[in-house]
Image: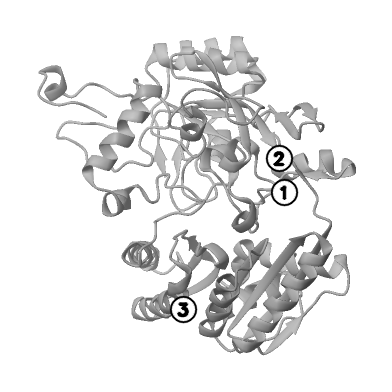
Amino acid sequence: MTRAPAVSSALARRLAAALGPAHVIADPAELRVYACDGITHGRTTPALVALPGSTEEVVEVVNAAREAGVPLVPRGAGTGLSGGARPSPGSIVVSLARMRRILELDLENGWARVEPGVINLDVSRAVAAAGWYYAPDPSSQGVCSIGGNVAENSGGAHCLKYGFTTNHVLAARVVLSDGSVVDLGGPAADAPGYDLLAAMVGSEGLLGIATEATLRLLRKPEVTRTFFATFPSTDEAGAAVSGIIAAGILPAAIEMMDRLAIVAAKAATGLDWPDVGAALLMDADGCRAEVEHVAARAIEITRAAGALEIRVPRDEAERQLMWKGRKSAFAAVGRISPNYLVEDGVIPRSEIARVLREIERMAAEAGLRVANVFHAGDGNLHPLVLYDARNPGEEARAAALGGEILRLCIRSGGSITGEHGVGAEKAAYMAEQFAPEDLETMQRVRCAFDGAALMNPGKVFPTPRLCGERPGPYRPHPAEVAGLAERW
């Protein structure tokens, strides 16, 4: 674990005075809780943790850190899977966990204004009785927060039909690194001016700290039809996915799991799923007449692709149990492996079967196992690389295999991330997907929001160090002082 240098006692006292002593964490044992996010194999202890309770208190934290030259790392619920909330050396973690109020509901116009610490699923719960819901549904939606979803542009099983977080955020209030507060977007569609909100959603904490978000709400569909299908292998399951989409069917969700992921889900939930090579779980929703037709047609295509068995839930309780099996898959892998890495690559749907075969070959060469569970409808893979950190060298082999899987996604016409973000884990692969000119343009956008590079430094962009650079608060390199180099 990397230990960060301590910040000055004067800065700690200033934050304690602004937020209250109970809302500033400096005890070394308590700081260890914030050393990582959902990716636990990389840890850095922060210098301090601040827990502001309002936009005004976030401004106080930002101003104090800027004047002291200390970097800030925004943090939601800590469920991220790319190291995005991992502290930078010498940083203050700004946890938004106290800001959990739903500030305003406007069901007449279909939106909710919330603070960043509100749990994703709680938005839907707050409006369910009136027949509304919030569509983005990460598998961790029972514990992940809206602020983290905004930072990572989180998706979920139903993003195939309904889109990602960016399609459901109408406005955001943001604190920038100079302490200013800006409002981006608005509750009405098509706010005038440049779409700066689109830059903010998915910016992974590099542009500012969102302290409010206005979310688009949707009416609950009239009916939802679900089916679960099993296959001899991922080849037939992939063919079923391609056939369903090629037929012009747009499922609300269509998820795939391979044999190892099914074994893990069964161990965690007790589901009576059979021992098969692959499984699909599909939702169709909307108007009753359309949904009944679409679901029946999708089942026909699935049978023609070689399905072994198709199950239709008898009631809502059985349907929810099927989805519990899918959504518990990440955590369930802990039942069959002491450690695992979560990757998040994207490939064209037509490449699913070939890429899964290649992943299996690569895993065998590395002497490791990979469980695959993913959003098959949009080709968003989540290979889980299983390993045992107690065995010397095995963690390094797992990390190397994860990197090769990301490279395979790039070669297959895809991307290194679909919804988990780049964070610290995938920054090294950005230069393999983007040209130097692309990365420079992205850095210029970042600098327009945060010229001081105060927010979440060391994330997203590959940063090979110049001779003489050191971790901790940024100090200009001599080449910059001489006007020979420029920092982005």
The foreground one among 166 and 10 is: 166
User: Spatial distance from mark 3 to mark 2, Cα to Cα?
Assistant: 35 Å
Helix, strand or loop at label 3? It is helix
The foreground one among 281 and 459 is: 281
The quarter of the displayed image where residue 241 is located: bottom right
Residue that appears at 43% across and 49% down: 42
Residue that appears at 74% across and 32% down: 112
Across and down, in percent, residue 195 comes to 48, 29
Residue that appears at 18% across and 24% down: 477
Query: Where 243 sits versus 18, above or below?
Result: below
> Which residue lies under the disc numbered 3?
353
- First-in-chain label (1 vs 2): 2
Q: How is the image coloured?
A: one colour
User: Within 10 angstroms of label 3, few (less than 14), some, or many (20 or more) residues?
Assistant: some
User: Within 10 angstroms of label 2, few (less than 14), some, or many (20 or more) residues?
Assistant: many
Is 47 on the left-hand or right-hand side of 330?
left
> Which residue lies under the disc numbered 2?
119
Helix, strand or loop at label 2? It is loop
Contact? badges 1 and 2 (CB < 8 Å): yes
User: Spatial distance from mark 1 to mark 3, Cα to Cα?
Assistant: 31 Å
Q: Looking at the picture, which amino acid does disc 3 mark?
A: Ala
The foreground one among 197 and 480 is: 197
User: Within 10 angstroms of label 1, few (less than 14), some, or many (20 or more) residues?
Assistant: few
Query: Where 110 sits versus 338, above or below?
Result: above
Query: Where 321 sits versus 97, above or below?
Result: below
Across and down, in percent, residue 430 comes to 32, 49
